[in-house]
Amino acid sequence: MIALLLQILAGLTHAMILFLIASGLSLIFGVTRTINFAHGSLYMLAAYLTLSLGSALPLGPLSVYTGMLVASLGVALLGGLIEVCFLRRVYRSPELYQLLLTFALVLVIGDAVKFFWGAEHRIGLTPPGLDGSMPILGQLVPMYDMAILAIGPAVALGLWCLLHRTRWGVLIRAAASDREMVGALCVSQAPLFTGAFVLGSWLAGLAGALQVPRQPLTNVMDAAIIVEAFVVVVIGGMGNVFGAFLGAVLLGVLQSLGILWLPREFHLALVFVLMAAVLVLRPWGLLGRPSAPPTADVGGAESPAAPLAAPRWLVAVGGVLLLIAPLLAPTFVVWVFVEILAFALFAGSLQLLVGTGGMISFGHAAYFGLGAYGAALLLKHGGLAMPAAFLFGPVLAGLAALLFGYFCVRLRGIPFAMLTLASAQIAYAIVHQWYDVTGGDNGLLGIWPAPFLASPVRYYYLALVVGAGGLILLRRITGSPFGLTLRAARDHALRCEAIGVNVRSHHLLAFLVAGVLAGFGGSVFAFLKGSVFPDYLSISMSVESLVMVLLGGIHRLAGAPVGAGLFKALDTLVTLYTPYWQAFLGGVLLLVVLAFPNGAMGFLGPRRAARRGDRG
C-alpha cells in the first residue's frame, strides 16, 4: 500500500510539470486557435538556459533560482517575438499552415540547442535548500518533488485570479469563447494574442526550468513532452486552462498505476488509449465546450482537377528519363530515387486526405510504418517469401486504417486531427514496447529483397511500378465522382449531408485507400533500408509527410511527388555540408508557409497557364 501511495505521489509530481506546459498550450490554443508544436521546444530551451545560467551566474546559492527565473522570462519574450513576427501572418490561413509553421520553428530551435549545447546528455543541479529528502510514510521523498507539488496548485490559483479577477483575463476568456464578438466590440485582438502567447510561453519555460533537477537534459526532450501535453489538453478540453489541471492529474495518476499493474507492452499505449476514448466519447474534453463544426478544414473551395496540363512530349520525355535513370546514375543516386518514390506514394496518399478530403491527419505515418512492419513481420516470423511479405504490408496498413478511420471519421476539425494523432501513437507505442514480436526500439533487421530483386536497378523498377501505379490511381480517384464528392464534403459537409451524401462512408473509404497506398510506400521503404524501426510510425514522420505535401502544393495532384523529391533532395544535399540540416529545412518551410503557401506546383502552375494564355 505504501509503495502504491508513493508511486501516485511521483505521478502527481510529473503531473504538475505537465500541467504547467499544458496550461500554456491550452491558453494559446483557446485564444489564437493555433496548435503550437513549438511549445515543447520552448520548454526544452528554458531547461538548457536554466542549466547554463545556474552554473554561470556569480550569485552563490541564488544562482540556480535566478537562472530559472531569467530562463523562463527569456523564453516568454521569445514566444512574444514568435507570435509577432511569424504567427500573426498566418492567423487567417488554414490550421494546417499554422501547424507547419510551428513545426518549422521546432526544427530551427532543435538544431540551435544542438549547436550551442551539443548532443550529449546534461545533468542539472538541485536548488540549494531543496536538495534533501523528507520522510513520508516511512520512506524518503525528495524535497524538490514536494516543492513542485506545491508550485503546481499555486500557479493554477494564480491563473484563476488572473483570468477571473482582471480585465485582461476577462478579455482573454471572451476571446477564447468568441473572438469575432470581441473584435466587434472594438477590442484590439493583437495585444490579446501576443499577451496570451507570452503567458503560455512563460508557463512552458517555467516547466522546463523546474524539470532541470529532475531528469537529464537531451536535445529531443521536447518531442516527448509535447505529445504528453497534447494528451492533457485533449482530456481536459482544448482551450480550458483548468481542464489542463484535471487532465494532468488524471494522466499522472494513470501513468503511475499503469507502471505497477500493466504489462510493459501497454505502459505507453495506455495514455493514448485514454486520449482516444475521451475524443470518441466527448470530443470537446472533460471541461471543454462543443464548438461549431467547421465548414472546411484546409483552404477554400477550388476547381476540380484539370486534365494533365503538360504537353505529351514532356510527359514522354519524363517517362523515358525515369526508365533510364538507374542505368546511368551511380548506385547511391538510384537508392535515393527509390526512397523518393516511397515517399511520393506516402505523401500522395496523405494528399488524398488533406487536399482532396480536407481531413488533417497528424498520424498518417502509422500506415506507412505498419506497411513496413507488416512486410517485415511476415518475412521474419511468418517465413514467407519476399513478394508475399511485400503485399502483406499494405493489407495490415489497410486494416489499421479501417479500424482507426471508423472512429476518426465521426469527428471533424481539431478533434479529428487529435484522434488521428492518438491512433498513430497507440500503434507506435505497441510497436515500440512489444519486444517479443516487433523487436521494440531495436527494430527488425535483415529485411532484404528476394535475390531476383536484390540489385539496385531491379529494385528501382519495382519501386517505380508501385509508386507510379499508386500515383496514377490517386489521380483517377481524385477526378472520379467519388473524388469530387470528397471535395464537396471538404468545402461544406453539412450541405452534402443535406442532399443525402453519406459523408462518413466517403471519408472512411478515403481512409482505407490512403492507408493501403501508404502501406505500399512502407513496404518499399522497408526492403530498401533492410530494417524497420518504431520511428517509421512516429509523429515526426507524420509531420514530415505534411511538409512534403505542402512543399509540392496541397491542392495539386503532382504536388506529392514534387514535394517528396524536394524534401529528400534537401535532406541529402544539405546533410553533406552541415549536420544542422533540420534548421535549414525549417528555414525553407518558414519561407514556403509565409511566401509560397500553395507550394512549388501552386506557384508554377498559374504562371505557366498565364504564359500559355499570352501566347494564345
Image: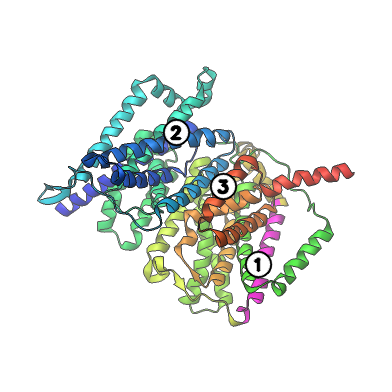
Mark 2 surroundings: few (<14), some (14-19) or many (≥20) residues within 10 A: many
Question: On the rendered structure, is 255 left or right of 386?
Answer: left
What segment carries the magenta color? 452-478
Classify 116 as above or below 498: below
Residue shown at 48% from the left, 59% from the top:
537
Residue shown at 79% from the left, 51% from the top:
307
Q: How far apart are marks 2 and 3 (CA)?
A: 22 Å
Q: Mark 2 points at which residue?
A: 197
Q: Mark 3 points at which residue?
A: 587
Residue type at tag 1: Val
Tag 1 near tag 3, CB within 8 Å: no
Give the numbered dot on residue 554: none
Q: Which of 211 and 228 is in front in this view?
A: 211
Mark 1 surroundings: few (<14), some (14-19) or many (≥20) residues within 10 A: some
Q: Distance between the residues labelled 1 and 3?
A: 32 Å
Check disc 3 and report its element: helix, strand or loop: helix
Residue type at tag 2: Phe
Most frequent secondary structure within the magenta stretch: helix
Residue type at tag 3: Gly
Give the numbered dot on residue 466: 1
Question: On the rendered structure, is 555 left or right of 52?
Answer: right
Q: Nearer the viewer, residue 1 or 528?
A: 528
